[in-house]
Amino acid sequence: MSVSFGVSFQILGTPALQLDGPETGPASERMDVSSDTLVIGLGNLLRGDDGVGIRVIQSLTGQKLPDGVEVVDGGTQGLGIVSLMEGRKRVIVVDAANVGKAPGEFACFTPADARLLGDDEHLTVHGAGLRDALLLAQALQVLPDDVVIVGVQPANLDWDDDLSPEVEAAIPQIVGRILDELEASSF
């Protein structure tokens, strides 16, 4: 099954933007669905710690990765990540998330763990984006069996192009955990 759909969103004070699917945005520049494992970082580099997923991807890009692993800057695609997951055996998503820990600490969990949250709770700081993408991928039967979310507790989500010191200091540990788990091939 091939997934293609349009996503429309509006930033306050600007006209609505239309994204036509996986061929739009930074992730499309490197998308290689022949890779069994996808590590995707989500976030906005201009919103403080919300950029942690992208910063982890930038760090992973300079590392020697096992064969069959692709890293992608997913930006703020929201539902656009569904098409990135299609055909993968394993997906690791890195994003800022309210995981109930101290800033910079992180937790690894599955979509099933995330569903334990009520409907009024948000999985990550993007609100509906990741949760809705996972539910849509499941409904379309393109959600890989092995999906892990690495949620990093933010300290600052204001307009700021720097990570907080706590989250910045955690990046090597997060990258190390992902590399270890990629080598071990299971979270």
Image (cartoon, helix red, strand yellow):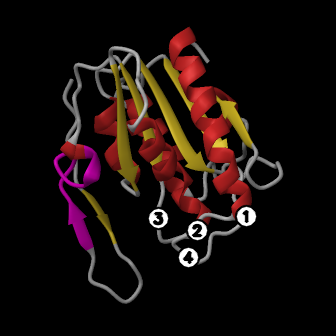
Which residue type carries mark 2? Gly
Circles 4, 3 touching at the beta carbon (< 8 Å): no
Residue 162, horizontal then vertical, whole percent: 56, 69
Q: Is residue 13 visible?
A: yes
Residue at mark 3 to residue at mark 2: CA–CA distance: 7 Å
Nearest to the observer: residue 126 or residue 7: 126
Which residue type carries mark 1? Ala
How many circles with numbers are drawn on the protein? 4
- Which class describes the residues within 10 Å of circle 2: few (<14), some (14-19), or many (20+)? many
Give the residue at the far top of this rendering.
Answer: 184
Residue 138, horizontal then vertical, whole percent: 43, 29
Name the residue at 72% across, 41% down. 106
Local SS, label 1: loop
Q: Quadrant of residue 142?
A: top left
Nearest to the observer: residue 86 or residue 120: 86
Return the residue at label 1: 155
Circles 1, 4 touching at the beta carbon (< 8 Å): no
Identify the image quadrant of the C terminus. Answer: top right
Upstream in sequence: badge 4 or badge 2: 2
Local SS, label 2: helix
Give the residue at the far bottom of this rendering.
Answer: 13
Which residue type carries mark 3? Leu
Upstream in sequence: badge 1 or badge 3: 3
Return the residue at label 4: 160
- Which residues are drawn in magenta? 17-27
Circles 4, 2 touching at the beta carbon (< 8 Å): yes
Upstream in sequence: badge 1 or badge 2: 2
Residue at mark 1 to residue at mark 4: CA–CA distance: 12 Å
Return the residue at label 2: 48
Residue at mark 4 to residue at mark 3: CA–CA distance: 8 Å
